[in-house]
Image (spheres, rainbow, N blue to C red):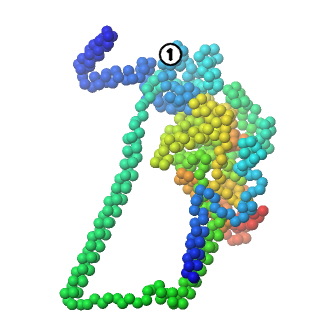
Amino acid sequence: MNRFGLKILMISLLLLQSCWGDKGDPNFEYMPNMYESLSYEAYTENNLFADSLSARLPVKGTIPRGYSLYEYEDTNEGYDLAKIELNNPYELNEDDMLKAKELYTVYCGVCHGAKGAGQGILVKREKILGIPSYADIGRAITPGSTYHVIYYGKNTMGSYANQLNEKERWMVTSYVMKLKSDLSK
Amino acid sequence: MDSKVFSNKFSYKLFKKLTKLSSIKSYAFYFFFITSFISTSYAQDGDPVAGKALFNTNCASCHKLDRKMTGPALRYVEKRLSEDEGLDREWLYKWIRNSSSLIKSGDDYANRIYLEYNKAAMTAYPQLTNIDIDNILAYTAQDKAVPKPAVVAAQVAVGPSNSMGLTDEIILGVFTVLFLLLSIALVIVTTALKNLAKYKGVKIEKKKKGKPLWKSYLENQFLMFCTAVFFLLASAYEFYGWTMQVGVNQGYMPVQPIHYSHKIHSGDNKIDCNYCHSSARVSKHSGIPSLNICMNCHKSIYEYNGETTEEYTKEFYDAEIQKLYKAVGWDDEAQEYTGVTYPVKWVRIHNLPDFAYFNHSQHVNVAGIECQTCHGPVEEMEIMYQHSPLTMGWCINCHRETNVKVKDNEYYDRIHAELSKKYGVEELTAAQMGGLECGKCHY
């Protein structure tokens, strides 16, 4: 009967409509072989390696293009040496310093605070405590020591070498030194 | 026995003495008497409140009171040092002001503790006076506060939601009563009218039974034709709608291997998106952060202390942090990496088809678009989901509506000047700049 057929059509359409009910699984695709990349992408699984990661670290003993070698070791001696002799090899203009402020706000400001006095939001909310001021006498930070700590991290602070490239690290370093001199006034 | 009697006598005497003193004085004395027993006798001469502030600003980055961190746990440090190592406060003064010179001088314990903590050099604090250090030591000599029973907190948490339910119920109840009263009134009115009709002798006509409505509907050919057309059009519309949503994953919300709450991290703690997704500035991908970035903070933050709900309790969040520690190979007890790591298989939510090219840095860095424009209110998401449809129509719509950001970007200066003259507009949209060219995204 006409009506019976219509009923079936309606019900089947409703079922079709609710096909993607479970939002925990991805929806249907028309032509998966056009949607999914044949070549390995950064975050795809890869059976060639034991840890199944497609994203690889640089081979040991090599440096990626555009990177340079950092010669100071991650030890107290390396820190002391960098503190004394390491200096900014880049000449930074005003635009760079504006950019440095942005980078500082994103990566450092959460703990060290906008003024570098160690009063970032995580400190104010008592998530992380004991962030020192840049003007701390005992630490007496220099451009070299600041760069060294951004590169390797120190104690509770982690390394920021993978979030900031070499020039950006130096930009942030000089912004930190500016904050230090502002704090020491 | 003797000593007990003596102590009893002693306290009796003390009590007598106390009663002699004026009330305020006696309270003060009694307070001192109690606190001197609670805290150890090593730090009577410091202010623990001032000490706490000093501790939090200077020491807390590496030391906690009851937990090993970069440096040792510091509760009862003075007592421990004097009992175990025979070191006095003078030694602590020296160590805190300049630990490295103490190590160099060949001090036995200084060298031992330096090696025990993997040669983590303690920062020198020449600015701390003896009084400051006394205050800090007074703070470390305090006993651990007994945590308040959790029942109270639970009751408080349940309280407001319960009262909310109660008001809802009251409102519902009032409505039900009103409805009942209305229906009763209606029944009364109809019976009264019927009675009136009877009294006046008016006859109420009863309806005749004819053909049922559905039968006459079926027999009417015009109506059936209209119905058929309506259903055909409706089903065509439904079918079209269904085909259009194939491959669109708006609302996709997979379960992730670690329950990472964007709400807590970027909403409550206001951590910038770029902090973790740092490659969005400089590359095609907005990278999923590697676990060392989590550890930038979670080396210090080992438990959750924020708002909780029934579903997401403190225990739940703490267990998730433990999952992170396991994956990254962090031994929280020993405060060091074990070297045994497991990759976390995050489920990717935003997937563009392989035939469409998209570059994050062009949008984030050059155009200066907020992440939320495409990803929605991520800072409110307890569980991350896909906010936008990510369809071609959606991309193009935005390119048509959004003006190109030319400020501080010399790269666009000339082409912007010439194109805006050509189109006769002041500001170009991304589409007018070539943002609709097929080859921009499909090649």
Residue A165 in the image: x percent, y percent? Answer: 71, 43
Q: Residue furthest left?
A: B199
Q: Which residue lies most toward the front here?
A: A1
Camera-side residue of B58 and B17: B17
* Rendered position, A88 above or below B210: above
Q: Residue B103, percent across and down?
A: 62, 18
Mark 1: amino acid: Ser
Provide the chain ID for the residue under circle 1.
B
Q: Residue B125: where, in percent of width, then height? A: 56, 25
Q: In this view of the protein, which residue sits in the foreground, B74 or A84?
A: B74
Name the side, left or right, on which B283 lies relative to B384: right
Quadrant of the image occupied by residue A66: top right
Q: Is residue A118 visible?
A: no
Q: Is residue B75 above or below residue B213?
A: above
Q: Residues within 10 Å of mark 1 (few under 14, many from 20)?
A: some
Image quadrant holding the C terminus of chain B, namely bottom right
* Residue at image coords 47%, 31%: B53
Q: According to the image, label 1 marks what residue?
A: B82
Query: B272 left or right of A143?
Result: left
Residue at the farthest top position: B2
Residue B114 sits in quarter: top right
| Residue at x-position 26% and y-position 14% | B13
- Which one is in front, A64 or B175? B175
Coordinates of residue B94 in the picture (x, y in percent): 56, 18
Q: Is residue B283 above or below residue B31?
A: below
Residue A50 seen in the current view? yes
Q: Residue at x 58, y 53 (%)?
A: B384
Residue beneath the point at 51% across and 25% down: B74
Foreground of the two, B406 or B40: B40
Give left or right: position of B16 versus A28.
left
Mark 1 element type: helix
